[in-house]
Image (cartoon, rainbow, N blue to C red):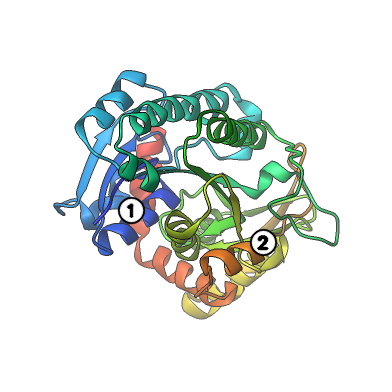
Amino acid sequence: MKTYLVTGGAGFIGSTFVLQNIKAGHRVVVLDALTYAGHKENLLEVSDSSLFEFVKGDICDANLVRSLFEKTAFDAVVNFAAESHVDRSISGPAAFIQTNILGTFNLLENSLSYWKSLSEEKKSSFRYLQVSTDEVYGELGETGKFSETTPYHPSSPYSSSKAGADHLVRAWNKTFGLPALITNCSNNYGPRQFPEKLIPLMIHHAVTSKPLPVYGKGANIRDWIHVEDHCRGIALVLEKGKIGETYCLGGNAERTNLVVVQKICEILNRLLPRSDGKSYDFLITYVTDRLGHDFRYAIDDSKAVKEVGFKREYTFESGLEATINWYLKNQKWIEAVLKNAKSK
């Protein structure tokens, strides 16, 4: 059994990692500020487990983070905590700088102090893992893929703040010797994703007969990875990854935004036909494109496949149908998180 400090563990990706690792028999301490996108409802199925502990708090709170290290012997820190929505970063970038850069700095400082206090044996096994994004690389043209050697070229305040955090992690590894790793992933989808992101937003709008807003002409391309595949990849990097290295985790599932929305409509037509007999795609509405909207992302994850044994269990089609089924069965979850978000 290992003990992990998982920051942002009540969020979409973080909660999936928490659930997987408690099921695997590891102990997990979650630190989460429970902002609009973090919800304790995401962790209900492990809330009574002796392997689970929840601490409400901000990764920027140095005293709180220090106290966690003083209280618990951690084998690893996995940092999911981040402000992550591009549109929000455009309208209010300050929170992104605070959490994504200053919060990461605080985690690194406390992780380093803790690591220095360990025995040589414990030092050799401790890991700090930073969960990052493919958006730090900027955008691609019609060909090519991002890899671990792609230069950083972020476009938005969100991706710039994540890029800054990645650079800090590398510096703490190179300068101070902190045994750190970075993973960069493509677009995630799956259960428990806050319904401001494309796939859950479209599902929620479709079943409530609201317009399905598509930026521009819907031609922007993303590479989609199911959140469970992503989190299994993170666990492999923690276990087998080489200290100081970066590992890209992708879905090998490039789709235009319009094709994704049309596929959601197609699946809903079969799973939940409208009473008026119309196809859900009549709700598709084209809206003004996002500022600085990157054209295309795609991930080359061959390094992770070769070095840590990363593999995907979901195709995009099977993962999307499973995701839609989850949301259809959990409308109360959507209503609860939207209500909670409005109160924050």
Nearest the camera: 215 or 15?
15
The dot on residue 129 is none
Tell us which disc is closer to us: 1 or 2.
1
- x, y percentage for residue 21? 31, 58
- What residue would you read off at disc 2? 223
Nearer-N-terminus badge (1/2): 1
**Residue, far front:** 120
- Helix, strand or loop at label 2? It is strand
Instruction: Please give the name of the residue rendered at 37% of the width and 27% of the height, measured from the top-left corner.
Output: 58
Residue 252 visible in the picture? yes
Nearest the camera: 121 or 262?
121
- Helix, strand or loop at label 1? It is helix
Q: Are marks 1 and 2 in contact (CB under 8 Å)?
A: no
Classify the position of the N terminus by image quarter: bottom left
Instruction: Please give the name of the residue rendered at 79% of the width and 58% of the height, measured from the top-left corner.
Output: 219
Tally the marks: 2
Question: Quick one: label 2, few (<14), some, or many (20+) residues within 10 Å?
Answer: many
Which image quarter: residue 30?
top left
Q: Amino acid at mark 2?
A: Asp
* Depicted 198 relative to depicted 101: above or below: below
| 46 relative to 4 in the view: left or right | left
Disc 1 to disc 2, how far (Cα)?
24 Å
Q: Amino acid at mark 1?
A: Val
- x, y percentage for residue 170? 59, 36
- What residue would you read off at disc 1? 18
Residue 278 visible in the picture? no
- x, y percentage for residue 82? 49, 37
Nearest the camera: 71 or 331?
71
Question: Quick one: label 1, few (<14), some, or many (20+) residues within 10 Å?
Answer: many
Instruction: Please give the name of the residue rendered at 37% of the width and 59% of the height, measured from the top-left corner.
Output: 331
